[in-house]
Amino acid sequence: MRQYRGKRIDGKGWVYGYYFCLENKPMDNEDPGYNARVIHGIFDNNELSNPVDFEGTIHRASYVEVHQASVGQGIGINAVGGKTEVHGGDICKDDITQLHTDEKIYRTGVIKWQDGGFVLHEIGGTGYTYLKPEMELEIIGNTTDNPELLEAGE
């Protein structure tokens, strides 16, 4: 199963692991003024030992709450250099230089899930390219930490 990453709501950076979403509903005997909320979390790979017991109870210490908009699934392709996996929401450059030219040509886009697969959706345009393992993607940022990179193409 592919891993996810998300930005922690406590401001302590990114967490990598397994994503979940649950609605925290009030019990019948709770205060009617109780505010239900949806929790987005990731079981932290660094703290994962036994996050769910036999009754299906999720133990608080085993997961980290994250901002929903920051959650991105690993796509199974490593960035140039091979050490960092590319995730949904990453902003990447792809070298599309043709063999007959000396000039380097790049396309820049955001990794998204679209039409049944991960794509590089071009910034400032409507075009997209389905990702292939042989693509040489360079991560230059992400939509959470670097929204200004999205404006560059407008």
Image (cartoon, helix red, strand yellow):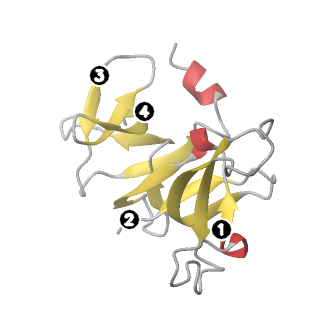
Q: Is the residue marked by circle 2 packed among few (<14), some (14-19), or many (20+) residues within 10 Å?
A: few
- Relative placement, left or right, of 136 versus 28 is left
Q: Nearer the viewer, residue 27 or 13?
A: 27
Question: Residue flagged by tag 3: what amino acid is it?
Answer: Gly
Q: Can you say whether 42 is above or below 149 in the image?
A: below
Tell me where residue 62 sits by quadrant.
bottom right
For the residues labelled 1 and 4, the Cα–Cα distance comes to 31 Å
Residue sitting at x 34%, y 60%: 77
Q: Amino acid at mark 1?
A: Tyr
Q: Residue 55: horizontal and vertical position, in percent? A: 52, 79
Task: Provide residue 130's location: percent of width, then percent of height.
Answer: 23, 40
Residue 103 is at least partly visible in this image: no
The percent coordinates of residue 137 (x first, y second) are: 39, 49
Of discs 1 and 4, which sits in the foreground?
1
- In front: 9, or 100? 9
How packed mark 4 is, by other alpha carbons closer than 10 Å (few <14, some 14-19, many 20 or more), is: many
Which of the 4 quarters of the picture holds residue 63? bottom right
Furthest residue in direction front, as rendered: 29
Residue that carries the numbered disc 4 in the rendered image = 109
Q: Is residue 59 visible?
A: yes
Q: Nearer the viewer, residue 102 or 87?
A: 87
Label 4's element? strand
Asked if disc 2 and disc 4 are in contact, CB closer than 8 Å, the reply is: no
Q: Position of residue 25 (x, y in %)?
A: 64, 47
- Kindly identify which residue carries mark 1: 63
Q: In the image, what residue type sits under mark 4? A: Gly
The residue pinned by badge 2 equals: 2
Disc number for residue 127: 3
91 to the left or right of 47: left
Q: CA distance from mark 1 to mark 2?
A: 17 Å
